[in-house]
Image (cartoon, rainbow, N blue to C red):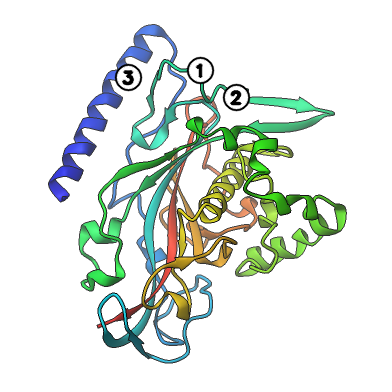
Amino acid sequence: MKIRSFMLAGLLWFMASVAQAQDVTEGTGTCTGHFVNPITDICWECLFPISLGSIHVWPSGKPDPKNPGLPICFCGTPIPRIGLAFGFWEPVRLVDATKKPWCFPNLGGLSLSPGINLGLNKMTNRDNGQDKGNWEIHWYIYPLIYWLEVVVDFLCLEAASFDIAYISELDPLWQDDELSFLINPEAVLFSNLIAQAACAADCVAATAGLPIDELFWCAGCQGSMYPLDGNIQAEYGQIQGSVLAVQRMAYKLHRELVAFGTMGSKGLCAKYPMPIMRKQQYRIQPVNPVPATSGPNTCVPMGRSNVLFESGRMIPVIGEDFGYLIWRKRNCCVM
């Protein structure tokens, strides 16, 4: 499996090199990025804190959601076992966020021409003096800890190889607000000033520590989670817009039962359906064009003010396509 992963990575690197060479020749080098180095581009302090029950055995200054209270756990499936209730953070997904259809920043700036008229959003426009953004998202399977064998207990890890799991250009629900209503009809309940004003509290909470899961319609300081598509109606910066699009995609995958819950007592034995995403389960780390590898705001909770981490994360013209590493909270019954 590991050999196949390295072969795939080599093939993608070759494809990206050819595409970049063609871009230089044709003068259309618009898609930029680099392959993520799994050693130097990763904030390994984001693994922490590590907990045993409710006790942090390896503490960290980064906020951590509530862990199961007891250190001992029992699971009946998939293998009956008594174990220890460990909690840790794992890097599991890699995400492209770009306004350029078929641009893959995390694949070295690879730009594809699929030959089909899909994903041709406008890059940016203005309406009544307010910026709008249309973002495309590519979601990669990226179980880095499993590859590097950092954690021994295989029952706690996602045994998978590198893969592109989702390409938003192929999804009409991601392109159109009205079509997205099919999977988030409750959005009409929160399209009012009172509901949106409550998001200010989520912004403050996420900036100070962790977001408020009960305010599930809020994306903290980035704006509203709804609609669950790539059309950002109030974009005030590239980082804000891209991070909001990433959060919406994570929520969309939960709603479609493609992503699952892994935190808390319910996650000790297996993943479980989480159609309303708990924002506290995730951290977001910038890896493209400029990786964030150290400091208090390298991997931030969903909704934290982008003012704290956006400085130096965008390079005009040559670095406006973004890549993010998704860290997921994992509570697991370890034998």
Query: Which of the two residues, 77 or 73, is positioned nearer the viewer here?
Result: 77
* SS at mark 3 in the image: helix
Q: Callout 2, which amino acid? A: Asn
Q: Which residue appears farthest toward the left when viewing the image?
A: 3
- Residue 117 image label: 1
- Residue 322 image label: none
Q: Callout 3, which amino acid? A: Ala
Query: Which of the two residues, 106 or 195, is positioned nearer the viewer here?
Result: 195
Q: What residue does disc 2 label? A: 121
Q: Callout 1, which amino acid? A: Asn
Question: Which mark is in front, 3 or 1?
Answer: 1
- Residue 19 image label: 3
* Residue visible at 59% across and 48% down in the picture: 248
Q: CA distance from mark 3 to mark 1?
A: 20 Å
Residues at marks 3 and 2 touching, judged by CB atoms closer than 8 Å: no
Q: Residues within 10 Å of mark 2 (few under 14, many from 20)?
A: some
Q: CA distance from mark 2 to mark 1?
A: 10 Å
- Using the image, determine if residue 120 lies above or below residue 264: above
In the image, taking residue 332 as reference, residue 255 lies left or right, namely right
Instruction: Tell me which label, 3 or 2, sits earlier in the chain.
Output: 3
Q: Quadrant of residue 129?
A: top right
* Residue visible at 33% across and 20% down in the picture: 20
* Residue visible at 33% across and 13% down in the picture: 22
Query: Which of the two residues, 314 or 85, is positioned nearer the viewer here?
Result: 85
Q: CA distance from mark 3 to mark 2?
A: 22 Å
Res 223 visible: no
* SS at mark 2 in the image: loop
Residue 135: x %, y % from top left: 57, 34
Residue 194: x %, y % from top left: 86, 58
Residue 292: x %, y % from top left: 44, 51
